[in-house]
Image: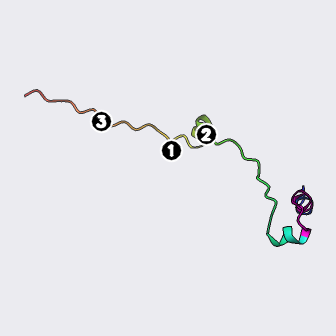
């Protein structure tokens, strides 16, 4: 649907004139297709293997008194 088709349909539906619809600033917004927000961590680790290495804290051992 183009902006012109949108304005004509809106004017027909509301009974307002085309100039009134245009003066009120209606606009057609097209939302882009977005990929789902999912991370494939296997793929990330293949690209940057050393960046995501698990680091463990050293184990503290108690000394007997």
Choose mark 2 or mark 1, whichever is in front: 2
**Alpha carbon of mark 3 to alpha carbon of mark 2: how far?**
30 Å
- Labels in figure, total: 3
Q: Splitting the image into 4 quarters, where does residue 26 fall?
A: bottom right
Image height check: is 12 above or below 22?
Answer: above
- Judged left or right of residue 31, residue 11 is right
Q: Nearer the viewer, residue 47 or 1?
A: 1
For label 3, the residue is: 58
Q: Is residue 45 left or right of residue 36?
A: left
State how far apart marks 2 and 1 are (Cα): 16 Å
Query: x and y percent of residue 38 in the render?
Result: 63, 39
Q: Is residue 21 magenta?
A: no
What residue is drawn where x is 80% and y is 55%?
30
Q: Which residues are magenta?
A: 7-18
Please, which residue is most extreme toward the left here? Answer: 65
Q: Quarter of the image for the C terminus: give it.
A: top left
On residue 39, the disc is: 2
Q: Nearer the viewer, mark 3 or mark 2?
A: 2
The circle drawn on residue 51 is 1
SS at circle 3: loop
Of the residues under marks 3 and 2, which one precedes in the sequence? 2
Q: SS class of the residue under badge 2? A: loop
Label 1: element kind: loop
Whether label 2 touches label 1, CB < 8 Å: no
């Amino acid at each position: 649907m183009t902006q012109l088709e949108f304005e004509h349909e809106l004017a027909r539906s509301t009974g307002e004139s085309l100039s009134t619809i245009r003066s009120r600033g209606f606009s057609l917004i097209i939302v882009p297709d977005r990929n789902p927000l999912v991370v494939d961590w296997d793929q990330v680790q293949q690209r940057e293997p050393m960046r995501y290495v698990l680091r463990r804290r050293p184990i503290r051992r108690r000394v007997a008194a």
